[in-house]
Structures are given as C-alpha cells and as structure tokens.
Image (spheres, rainbow, N blue to C red):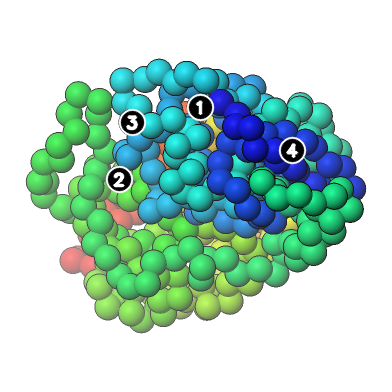
Amino acid sequence: MSSSVPALLGLANGKVFRGRSVGVEGSRVGEIIFNTSMTGYQEILTDPSYAKQIITLTYSHIGNTGANDEDYESTRVWADGLVVRDVPGLHNNYRSQYSLSDFLQRESVVAISEIDTRQLTRIIREEGALNACVIAGESVDDEEIVERARAFGGLEGLDLAKEVTRAKPEVWTTGSWSFNHRAQKEQQTHYRVVCYDFGVKRNILRLLVDRHCEVIVVPATTPSAEALSFKPDGILLSNGPGDPAACDYAITAIQNLFKVSIPVFGICLGCQLLALAGAAKTIKMKFGHHGANHPVQEIAGNRVLITSQNHGFCVDKESLPEHFELTHVSLFDGTLQGLRHKEYPVMGFQGHPEASPGPQDNRYLFDDFIQLMQQYKAKQHA
C-alpha cells in the first residue's frame, strides 16, 4: 500500500517517473535492473549480489504474502532501491509476520510504487541497465534527480565483494527446513567445505549442510594458504556483486587452488572468477539476467533446465581457453552458463542452482560437487 509521501525515479537518460513511497524517505543511486520473478521479493532484496542496484520487479502486485524473519538470504537488504507497480493494501500468508512496507521501513529501503514498470522495463531492454536515482520525501526537480543518477560511477571496475563479505571465518551448521519440520537435527558430516563469501546466499550453505558437509565460510580476501589450512575436501566460490575483474585477490587465490587440484565449485560471481583465473575474460552485459524463469541448456544431457539468475557480467565464451569445457548455455541469448576444467576437478555455473527464489532444476550440481570431493578423498587416502 502506497503512502502519501511522493517519490521520484530518475534515469541517466533523462527520463523521470513519479510515484509514491513504500519505504523510508531518502535518496539512493545505483544501476537499475529488472527482475522477472513473480515471487520471492524478500529473498531477492536480501541477496548481496544486488548491492549498488535498484531493482524493478516486473510482476504487477508485490507484497501479497508479506515478509518474515525466515526468508532472509543474508543478514540485511543489500539492494539500493526498489521499484514496483503496486503494493496491495492487504497481505495474507500463514508465515507472514509483517507487511512489505513494514519490512522496507525496518530495513531502511527507499522504494517507489505506482510506476509503469512495463514502460521502465522496455527502456532497460532497449538501452541497457542505466544508472538511476530514487528519492522519497525530498523535493527536487527533474534536472537534479537526473544529474544525481548520472553522477553514479556504474558497476564496471567496482569491487563490491569486499563490501558485502563477512569479517572473519564462521562455521555454518543450518540445513534446509520444511514447513512442517523446522528444527534441524544433528547429522554426521562426511566432507569439509570452505566457502569463499563474495556475497554468499544462505541457501547455498543450507544445501551443502543437507549433503553432510561441514561448512566453514571465510572472507572474500582470504589467501589460498589460509583456506587450505582448514584441510577442506572442497572449495566453494560464492555468488556476489560487482565486476569480477576487479577481484584480483580472489583470482590469485583461485590460481593457487588450481595447483593443488582440490575440487572447486563456482557459482555466479564465483564462476566468473574461475574463468578469469583460467585466462578467460568477462564482459558487462547489456541488461543482465535477473529472474527465476530462465531456460538453460545442459549440453551433455541435451536437456533444458529452468533456472534462477542474477548477474550483470558474464564469461565471454569466445575467450574460453581450451582447458575449459562449456557445459551450459542460456537459451535466451546463448551466453555461457556453465563450465568445467578438463584437467582439474573444477566446475562453475553462472546461474543460481540453489535458487531461493526459483526452481530446483539445477540442484544436481551440488551432487556433482560432492562426487568430485568423493574422488578427491579417495585419492588422498589411496
């Protein structure tokens, strides 16, 4: 439900939209993108991969099911703004604890409603992701809000993994829960995984715990020697925001991990960093992939998987060296979606196999990672 507080959205191309605030008063700038998911707005907003981005949700009614304390994918909202068409006056779900507007208020999110999101999405599709400014409760003219949008430096060359990562190593023990069985039982662990936190989503960690993994989450800048000092059976490189080419410290660490032939699984930003460590290149996409309904072709099995996506950069598949094998491609635009190293036990996936929100078609990739660790442990004890 919109408030009486006026709000503005200004784009760097000079276009200005007027609406009503559904969050806090203030001003935010960032890159504006659109997400085609129909549900999961709370998980989307709390995904650290959206740092320095203003999210446009293309589904017309957002907030129908409210929000709760369980559907956070990190400790807080990382998106720098939210743009929606309509927030219903009533929300209804047995898990709901508060309304979307209350959630946005407690998380200090500047958000605007009553926007023609179809028109806005067409602009982004035609012109690409634009720098933008969203303002609520502040009187500014069109020229000023556009200038604020243009003043944002953009995401290219920006290292955001350092900003969203945790400060020190932590052990993660919580697995997935069902609606009827929320208590987690102690279980025996078979593998130890060190997860690099470049902006990790909690559901990645849950799915590792489900597969009997002891999970140690380390900061983004952790040197490879420190990660290996935990004596892991595998390394997971998480999702995250910003330009992968700016994360030189991570690329160096991954190159050192290659040398010891330990299993490595890269997701989203982690996949891009894998490719960069192997001498491939990454590129900024026109408007990226953001949503929970993206078709991806698995090349080996010749099958189509519906996937959850959130990235504005991708690996340039034309730059992929011979020692990498292309495993998945997007059926939207043919961009690289998955890769494997031909020599080392290394695999990456550009989308989000953990979803949350989204389909579960690609969760088998976690099982593939487990198989790599099984083989690695067998060799270690041979």
Which of discs 2 and 3 lies nearer the camera? The answer is: 3
Mark 2 / mark 4, whichever is N-terminal: 2
Q: Is residue 347 left or right of residue 232?
A: right
> In this rendering, does residue 135 appear at all?
yes
Q: Answer few, some or many: residues within 10 Å of disc 2's Cα (few below 14, many 20 plus, some between 14 and 19).
A: some
Q: Quadrant of the N terminus?
A: top right
Give the residue at mark 2: 206
Labelled pair 4, 3 in contact (Cβ < 8 Å): no
State the residue at coordinates (66%, 54%): 27
Give the residue at mark 4: 333
Q: Is residue 186 above or below residue 331?
A: below
- 118 or 329: nearer the viewer: 118
Q: Secondary structure at mark 4?
A: loop
Give the residue at mark 1: 63
Q: Answer few, some or many: residues within 10 Å of disc 1's Cα (few below 14, many 20 plus, some between 14 and 19).
A: many
State the residue at coordinates (86%, 48%): 142
Disc ID at residue 279:
none
Alpha carbon distance from label 2 to label 4: 31 Å
Amino acid type, residue under disc 1 in the picture: Gly
Give the residue at mark 3: 97
Labelled pair 4, 1 in contact (Cβ < 8 Å): no
